[in-house]
Image (cartoon, helix red, strand yellow):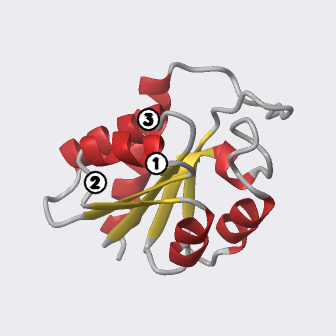
Amino acid sequence: MKIAVIDGQGGGIGKYIIERLRKELPEQTEILAFGTNALATAAMLKAGANEGASGENAITYNCGLVDLIVGPIGIIVANSFLGEVSPRIAEAIASSSVPKILLPVIKDRIEIAGYTSQPLPHLTDDLVSRVRRYFEYE
């Protein structure tokens, strides 16, 4: 199983996701880090990703080559992360037939009705639980 973790800016959310997935998933799980920039990718590689790549082409190319995509919801919003998520990145991720599990963490111009703010560790607990359930059925 291959999981793509996508993040931008400093990669802090992606780093935290990867650390948690590494603790919870089988050792043979392949976790790939895709950052909108090299700093984000480096942080996720340091957290335990098997491989990583940076930039628009790496992200758009790999969206269909993995079993699951995870990251903050901003990865499907064009121009989020202070413009780091290009419209092409957002479209490639959102249009990919690959299932996505996204954290409702967004600072940009979007509010999610019905969502109550929770700390990142609680949100990540839910994300990891959903990833585990997803792979139990395969």
User: Which label sits in the foreground, 1 or 2?
Assistant: 1
The amino acid on which the numbered mark 1 sits, given as a three-letter code, is: Ala
Q: Which residue is mark 3?
A: 124
Number of the label disc, if any, that sits on residue 126: none
Q: Name the quadrant containing residue 113.
A: top right
Q: Name the quadrant containing residue 127.
A: top left
Relative to 54, say whether 121 is above or below: above
> Residue most toward the left?
27
Looking at the picture, how far across and down is residue 134, in whole percent? Answer: 41, 63
Mark 2 Cα-neighbour bin, 10 Å: few <14, some 14–19, many ≥20: many
User: Which label sits in the foreground, 1 or 3?
Assistant: 1
Looking at the picture, how far across and down is residue 131, in whole percent? Answer: 40, 55
What whole-number distance in Å separates the C-alpha atoms at marks 1 and 2? 14 Å
Q: Earlier in the sequence, mark 1 or mark 3?
A: 1
Residue depicted at x 62% and y 78%: 97
The amino acid on which the numbered mark 2 sits, given as a three-letter code, is: Ala
Q: Are marks 1 and 3 in contact (CB under 8 Å)?
A: no
- Camera-side residue of 106 and 56: 56
Lateral position of residue 11 relative to residue 111, left or right: left
What whole-number distance in Å separates the C-alpha atoms at marks 1 and 3? 23 Å
Lateral position of residue 35 relative to residue 26, left or right: right
What whole-number distance in Å separates the C-alpha atoms at marks 2 and 3? 17 Å
**Which quadrant of the rendered structure holds the N terminus?**
bottom left
Q: Earlier in the sequence, mark 1 or mark 2?
A: 1
